[in-house]
């Protein structure tokens, strides 16, 4: 029986990898594989996405309580991204050393603790405390994100990875885009602390099914890879097309960081147009109507035709959308014009959500998947971290328009690299030697 027999199963008893090695996947008899996938990975994805979404419209208002400028306020997002950046490589090494499962469980626990601390800071904390707690949240998020993508790389067939990754991002985006509506109205009704308490409780509940349905995916693949490995693992990261993929991930995440982890797409209207948490929550959550269906469909396109069929148009449209926001800032246009650009940004960027990690699962060396994803996330989070940092500096020195021009430029540069320097990473089964 070859790996294609269970191609619809993200989590199956045994899977044939691209290089012919076998990997064990988490499975339990009597439980449908799709249900296993939902309980083990999708439920926590929704909870963590919900948590990020709940906090985004509230954080700008929270920073105003401390009396800080927009440049200082941007550090609330920088601190979170620095946490994801610092944790990237250590998490990858731990995933290879102790396995995927324990990191998958530990990450949400760290996130839940950080949310409780942020709720406490909203009562009696300082701005510096808030930065520390946001840093801790970034560490926990990185632990979970890396372990989940490594599980998919361990267990997923190459022609299913696009769907698997985008489905994961899709359900996470359901939470991320629904969260602002909940967080905004909770903050207005009960106080700025309440969204973070809600998030902590939901996150703790979400990992209960993960504990019972997810088993370790690494052992068999790692043993086979270790036996075949010659020379240092770091050298594997220098083989083509890995350096090219890393450069694309960095440039793309400079732009994406402004929309998701960086949150400056919400920080800007809070300061420039005076929108409150509830208004920001409605605006952000409304984006789920158009973006989630797009995100799910891109996975099917990537698996059927190739990764570049969504990456290139997605990056070009994202660049144009950021340019449209810069026009609203330079020209001092009304809120209605900004909302139109806001919608454009979210629709465009949904096309490239999950694409970078799909590229990563395609090129990750089986001998060092944890190390690869650690370095991949380090590079990507470096780009995401640079996003709010550069936004704060440029907006303070030259205005909001200049900051959005940079975000448009990095997306366009990433598209150029993909077109001219990256070969298609989707490999068809009938062209792959050694299948079966």
Image (cartoon, rainbow, N blue to C red):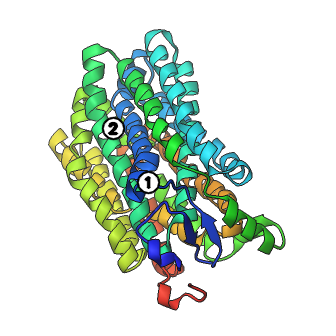
Farthest right residue in view? 231
- Give me the C-alpha separation between circle 1 and circle 2: 45 Å
Indicate the position of residue 52 as horizontal and vertical percent values: 41, 37
Question: In front: 424, or 160?
Answer: 160
Q: Which residue is rendered at x = 84% and y = 71% of the image? A: 231
Q: Is residue 239 left or right of residue 198?
A: right
Residue 313 in view in this figure: no
Query: Does residue 40 sit above or below 197 in this rendering?
Result: below
- For label 2, the residue is 266
Indicate the position of residue 415 as horizontal and vertical percent values: 43, 70
Name the mark nearer the viewer: 1 or 2.
1
Farthest top residue in view? 124
* Image label count: 2
Q: Which residue is rendered at x = 64% and y = 43% of the image? A: 87
- For label 1, the residue is 30
Question: In front: 9, or 13?
Answer: 13
**Which quadrant, please, contains the C terminus?**
bottom right
Q: Which residue is rendered at x = 41% and y = 78% of the image? A: 306
Indicate the position of residue 417 as horizontal and vertical percent values: 50, 73
Indicate the position of residue 72 as horizontal and vertical percent values: 49, 28
Q: Quadrant of residue 295?
A: bottom left
């Amino acid at each position: 029986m070859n790996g294609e027999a269970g191609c619809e199963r993200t989590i199956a008893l045994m899977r044939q990898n691209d290089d012919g090695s076998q990997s064990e996947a988490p499975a339990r008899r009597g439980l449908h594989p799709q249900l296993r996938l939902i309980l083990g990975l999708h439920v926590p994805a929704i909870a963590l996405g919900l948590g990020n979404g709940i906090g985004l419209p509230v954080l700008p208002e929270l920073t105003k309580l401390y009396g800080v400028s927009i440049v200082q306020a941007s550090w609330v997002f920088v601190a979170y991204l620095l946490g994801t950046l610092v944790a990237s490589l250590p998490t990858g090494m731990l995933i290879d050393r102790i396995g995927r499962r324990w990191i998958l469980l530990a990450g949400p626990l760290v996130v839940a603790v950080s949310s409780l601390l942020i709720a406490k800071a909203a009562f009696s904390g300082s701005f510096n405390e808030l930065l520390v707690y946001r840093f801790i949240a970034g560490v926990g998020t990185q632990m979970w994100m890396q372990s989940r993508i490594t599980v998919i790389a361990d267990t997923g067939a190459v022609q299913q990875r696009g769907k698997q990754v985008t489905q994961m991002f899709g359900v996470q985006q359901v939470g991320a885009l629904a969260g602002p509506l909940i967080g905004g109205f909770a903050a207005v009704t009960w106080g700025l602390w309440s969204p973070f308490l809600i998030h902590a409780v939901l996150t703790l509940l979400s990992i209960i099914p993960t504990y019972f349905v997810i088993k370790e995916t690494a052992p068999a693949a790692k043993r086979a890879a270790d036996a075949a490995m010659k020379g240092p693992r770091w050298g594997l990261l220098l083989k083509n097309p890995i350096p090219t993929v890393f450069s694309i991930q960095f440039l793309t995440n400079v732009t994406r960081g402004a929309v998701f982890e960086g949150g400056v797409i919400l920080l800007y209207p809070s300061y420039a147009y005076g929108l409150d948490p509830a208004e920001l929550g409605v605006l952000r959550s409304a984006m789920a109507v158009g973006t989630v269906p797009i995100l799910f469909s891109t996975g099917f396109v990537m698996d059927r035709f190739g990764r570049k069929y969504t990456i290139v148009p997605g990056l070009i449209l994202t660049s144009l959308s950021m340019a449209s926001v810069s026009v609203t800032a330079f020209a001092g246009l009304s809120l209605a014009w900004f909302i139109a650009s806001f919608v454009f940004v979210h629709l465009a960027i949904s096309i490239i959500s999950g694409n970078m990690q799909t590229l990563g699962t395609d090129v990750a060396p089986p001998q060092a998947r944890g190390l690869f994803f650690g370095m991949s996330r380090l590079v990507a989070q470096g780009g995401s971290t640079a996003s709010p940092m550069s936004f704060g500096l440029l907006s303070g020195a030259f205005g909001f328009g200049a900051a959005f021009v940079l975000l448009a430029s990095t997306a366009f540069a990433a598209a150029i690299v993909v077109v001219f320097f990256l070969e298609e990473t989707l490999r068809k089964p009938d062209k792959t030697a050694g299948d079966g």
